[in-house]
Amino acid sequence: MVRNLSELLEPCPTEEFFASNWGKKFRYIKGWPGKFADLLTWERLDEIVCRYEFDHPRVHLFKDHQVVPPDTYLKYVANRRDKKLFRAKLQGAALNEQLRQGASLVVDNVEEVSGQPLLELTADLQRIFHENIAVNAYGSFKTTNALNVHWDAHDVLIVQVAGQKHWSLYGETRPYPLEQDIAPNTEPTTEPIWEGMIEDGDVLYIPRGCWHYVVPAGPSIHLSMGIFNRTGLDLLDWVTRQLRSSQTFRMDLPRFASPEQKEAHVRQLGAELLEAWNSELIDRFFDYTDGMAESRPKLGLPWSVLEEVLPDSDEVRVRLASLRALNLKLSADGKTVSFFSQGKRWKLPSQTMPVLQALNEGERSTNELCVAADGKLGPEAVRKFIKQLVTQGLIVPAETPEESAAMHASR
């Protein structure tokens, strides 16, 4: 079973991958058949497409470098509660016919509906990369190419789940291209810098801007895990928004002022910008983006809306609602611990630090958090603290005793 980045990259050591490849050059990692078998099966892909009946473009088809018109396999029917609203209804026979003719099936953000294995892996990637991860599933059935040679505006981990596909990589023609750029990213005119068959269990890392071309070799499923890294432009945009607190930057520019007054105004703008643009800027930016990261939904019904909040059991497991670790900061006097999460500034007694540190490492049971408290909080105080954090939305149930029993019974 593959549940984290280390297991995903195996046998390539994670440290070596980050040192040699991340953001620099592609990496092909040979795996073994069945390595990713539980992430997404053909049966599960079939169930996802048929059960959820997603609208275009959440589910879409590609064939011969073109998007297949959705009205060839989707029908729109009126909502029974509001006839002015329509929902997409999949036409199974029509979809199968398109696939028989060589179309490839794509399901965007498949991690949201695929099940626990892929959801766990995606959560680990988000914790490590501190960025949004979007996983798209590509199902191909013939040897027809879906997309022309192209590049992505984000880094990609290709995970071959079943079958095989032939990949050709051409490298970059413009360093760090953007989707909305001021110059074109011209197509490559040279031969591929690498090409090969990606088989069941293999991984291919493709940095942003690397042109590539893919041809299926029969029935195949691969997962495209997009990692959306921040750039200097994102940093600049954030600094610009922070400068709204400055009266100087909010002022009208002195269009009718004298040259001397304009120069003085520019100097003042520059001084305030440089004050914000210091050596701690990147860390402050990352702290902010981590703190604003959206949580993965989990209600914990029915307990989350009852007075008890959680079942009265030491085996109840909880996790951080956010997929980012908390950046815990102890106050100078040692009395409080503060952090930024869920778009909110938190300040808690320092005795809670060991519990928060344990939650940073992953999901924990109530009993494990009582042990982690190391005597700084008694068991009853820990249980009360956990329920308060659930109520305030900082942590959510990861698995109740009932869910745990059902899950283990099904294995």
Image (cartoon, rainbow, N blue to C red):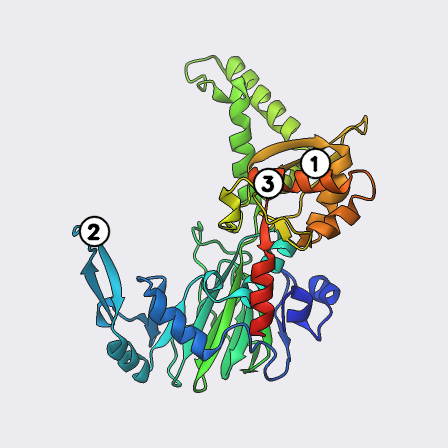
Residue 206 seen in the current view: no
Tell me the residue at 39%/73% (across/down). Answer: 47
* Amino acid identity at mark 2: Arg
Tell me the residue at 56%/49% (across/down). Answer: 230
Label 1, on which residue? Answer: 280
Q: CA distance from mark 1 to mark 3?
A: 16 Å
Q: Is residue 208 left or right of residue 183?
A: right
> Of callouts 2 and 3, which one flags the residue occurring earlier in the amino acid sequence?
2
Mark 3 neighbour class, 10 Å CA radius: few under 14, some 14 to 19, many 20 or more: many
Label 2, on which residue? Answer: 81
* Amino acid identity at mark 3: Gly
Q: Position of residue 207 (x, y in %)?
A: 57, 63
Q: Nearer the viewer, residue 174 or 394?
A: 394
Mark 1 neighbour class, 10 Å CA radius: few under 14, some 14 to 19, many 20 or more: few
Label 3, on which residue? Answer: 291
Q: Residue furthest left?
A: 83
Tell me the residue at 51%/25% (across/down). Answer: 244
Q: CA distance from mark 2 to mark 3?
A: 39 Å
Q: Is residue 80 left or right of residue 143?
A: left
* Amino acid identity at mark 1: Glu
> Of callouts 1 and 2, which one flags the residue occurring earlier in the amino acid sequence?
2
Q: Nearer the viewer, residue 407 or 47?
A: 407
Q: Is residue 312 left or right of residue 335?
A: left
